[in-house]
């Protein structure tokens, strides 16, 4: 394979959850008729088989099992999927992540996932306050998170991410720091610390809870950032904090506008080749996907969309990327950034030497991105 051929990340979606949380806008479906593990796994294998030429031509650098709740599925299903992808439990392995919820850890032990080659765990803690977890509609309690984390360590996971949300309904800055402090005490290699947003088509959007005032939110973000930095975590993306050498390879690939293939109900992909850059999307309803796993919607990205999507990802990185990366990833000349880029530089929001925001621009990132629409 030539050095110019992009590497490939793999995203595999598992669409079922025990319960749909009121803030969740992901493609997740409550378990109603039981987990259809075998037919869904067979659909995934057929889907992957349809992309065998792509998979054979690229070096896979990461695999991410997301959801939904992937940990509802047995280790054997993941073994089959990894084998179909050509990722075996022998020799050097890419980063292989599974998302798990503390409330479903009893379904299958972490040892089983580790034994099939999964080497990174992302645990959906969200909060260490039982009151806050109940408001979020979570099915687990704080003690279950502590036990799940300990069990994962015993199982051999030495690369663990904790998801923590701040700006929760009626949350105070002190409660935010308490949550974050308890997460740090556990010593995960990675913390995804992100603000609660009321996404369209969610229960929280239809019936908004009482959220903290803007000044409280700013206090939470500032104090939390200082706490993470003092604990040795480095912010490498808007919501991502990692210990040295533990950045998520899979997520970095997204933000650097790398290629990735998506398999499973509602999974998205982005593939580039000599013909251009295109997005792919599978059917979001599990039943439709299982009936026709090969069906996908393919969208070619024009220059305007390419420009925006590249910036949407690259500017989430505090250090951004060199200007030359725009051309490498999209084939576009940096002239397509004008006049908006020079205007952003003049306003003190964008840097002149690379595709990156200033510290001020990072705070107002949403507004910066809007200027390129």
Image (cartoon, rainbow, N blue to C red):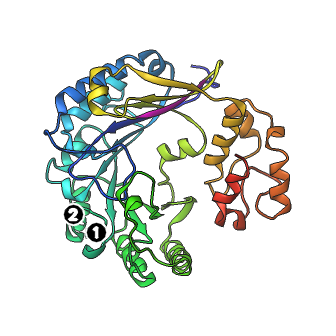
Say which mark, if any, is on residue 140.
2
What residue sits 52% from the left and 24% below the top? 298
Give the x, y percent position of residue 159: 37, 54
Residue 158 falls in image quadrant: bottom left
Q: Is residue 259 above or below residue 214?
A: above
Instruction: Check contact, mark 2 vs mark 1: CB within 8 A.
Output: yes
Viewer can see residue 9: no
**Magenta span includes 137:** no
* Place of residue 86 in the rendered image (x, y in percent of width and height, measured from the top left): 36, 24
Q: Which mark is residue 328?
A: none
Q: Is residue 159 left or right of residue 318?
A: left
Closer to the camera, 203 or 81? 203
**Location of residue 12 by image quarter:** top left
Q: Which residues are magenta?
A: 267-272
Between 178 and 218, the one lying in front of the other is 218
Between the residue at mark 2 and the residue at mark 1, the CA separation in whole angstroms equals 7 Å
Give me the disc on residue 133. Answer: 1
**Picture layout, residue 129 above or below residue 202:** below
**Could you say where residue 152 lies in the image, as x and y percent from the top left?**
25, 56
């Amino acid at each position: 394979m030539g050095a110019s051929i992009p590497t490939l990340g793999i995203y595999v979606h598992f669409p079922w959850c025990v319960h749909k949380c009121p803030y969740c806008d992901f493609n997740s479906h409550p378990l109603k008729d039981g987990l259809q593990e075998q037919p869904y796994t067979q659909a995934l294998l057929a889907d992957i088989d349809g992309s065998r030429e792509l998979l054979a031509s690229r070096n896979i650098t990461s695999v991410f099992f997301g959801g939904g709740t992937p940990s509802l599925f047995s280790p054997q299903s993941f073994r089959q999927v990894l084998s179909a992808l050509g990722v075996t439990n022998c020799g050097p392995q890419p980063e292989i992540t599974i998302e798990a919820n503390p409330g479903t850890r009893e379904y299958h032990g972490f040892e089983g996932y580790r034994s099939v080659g999964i080497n990174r765990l992302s645990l959906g803690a969200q909060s260490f306050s039982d009151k806050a977890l109940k408001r979020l509609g979570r099915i687990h309690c704080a003690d279950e998170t502590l036990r799940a984390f300990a069990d994962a360590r015993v199982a051999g996971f030495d690369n663990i991410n904790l998801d923590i949300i701040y700006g929760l309904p009626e949350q105070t800055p002190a409660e935010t720091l308490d949550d974050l402090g308890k997460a740090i005490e556990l010593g995960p290699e990675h913390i995804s610390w992100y603000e609660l947003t009321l996404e369209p088509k969610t229960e929280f959007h239809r019936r908004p809870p009482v959220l903290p005032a803007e000044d409280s939110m700013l206090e939470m973000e500032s104090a939390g950032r200082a706490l993470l930095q003092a604990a040795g975590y480095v912010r490498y993306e808007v919501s991502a904090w990692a210990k040295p050498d533990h950045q998520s390879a899979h997520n970095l690939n997204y933000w650097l506008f790398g290629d990735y293939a998506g398999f499973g109900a509602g999974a998205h992909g982005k593939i580039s080749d000599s013909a251009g850059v295109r997005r792919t999307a599978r059917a979001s309803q599990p039943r439709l996907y299982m009936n026709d796993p090969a069906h996908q919607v393919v969208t070619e990205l024009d220059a305007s969309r390419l420009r925006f999507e590249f910036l949407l990802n690259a500017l989430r990185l505090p250090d951004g990327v060199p200007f030359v990366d725009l051309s490498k990833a999209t084939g576009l000349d940096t002239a397509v950034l004008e006049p908006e880029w020079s205007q952003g530089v003049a306003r003190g929001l964008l840097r002149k030497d690379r595709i990156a925001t200033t510290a001020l621009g990072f705070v107002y990132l949403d507004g910066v991105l809007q200027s390129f629409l």
